[in-house]
Image (cartoon, rainbow, N blue to C red):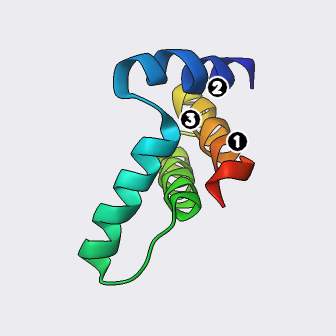
Amino acid sequence: MDKAASLTVNDRDEQYGSWSENAEATATIWSVLLDAPVSARQVALCMAALKMVRLRKHETHEDSWVDLAGYAALGGENDQA
């Protein structure tokens, strides 16, 4: 969890900008592509699902576990509702 927190708060923010801005932008694009409304929280759920699918093939891949924990934490943030 500490590693996931450090990646989502520090490293990823510096590289790509804030999660909330990126999740909102992703939700907007996915909404257009899917022709259905998508929320930032749903983006976190879908990204977590992607990590779970990858873990089916490589159960010991640490980065996927860390990313899964990070997406779960970000999706659970109050400002992502």
Q: Residue at x 26, y 74 (%)?
A: 32
The amino acid type found where label 3 is placed reads Asp
Q: Nearer the viewer, residue 26 or 4?
A: 26
Residue 67's label in the rendered image is 3
Q: Assign a secondary structure to mark 1.
A: helix
The location of residue 58, given as percent across then percent down, is 51, 39
Q: Residue at x 52, y 58 (%)?
A: 40
Q: Tags 2 and 3 in contact by the CB under 8 Å rule?
A: yes
Horizontal side of 18 relative to 52 (left or right) equals left
Quarter of the image where one finds residue 16:
top left
Query: From where the camera sits, is residue 76 visible?
Result: no
Dot 1 alpha-carbon crowd within 10 angstroms: few under 14, some 14 to 19, many 20 or more: some
State which tag comes first along the sequence, 3 or 1. Answer: 3
Horizontal side of 74 relative to 55 (left or right) equals right
The location of residue 78, given as percent across then percent down, is 74, 51
The location of residue 81, given as percent across then percent down, is 66, 61
Residue 47's label in the rendered image is none
The amino acid type found where label 1 is placed reads Ala
State the CA–CA distance, disc 2 to disc 3. Answer: 6 Å
The amino acid type found where label 2 is placed reads Ala
Q: Nearer the viewer, residue 23 or 54?
A: 23
State which tag comes first along the sequence, 2 or 3. Answer: 2
According to the picture, the residue beneath numbered tag 1 turns out to be 73
Q: Residue at x 54, y 45 (%)?
A: 55
According to the picture, the residue beneath numbered tag 2 turns out to be 4
State the CA–CA distance, disc 2 to disc 1. Answer: 9 Å
Q: Tags 2 and 1 in contact by the CB under 8 Å rule?
A: yes
Q: Assign a secondary structure to mark 2.
A: helix
Quarter of the image where one finds residue 4:
top right
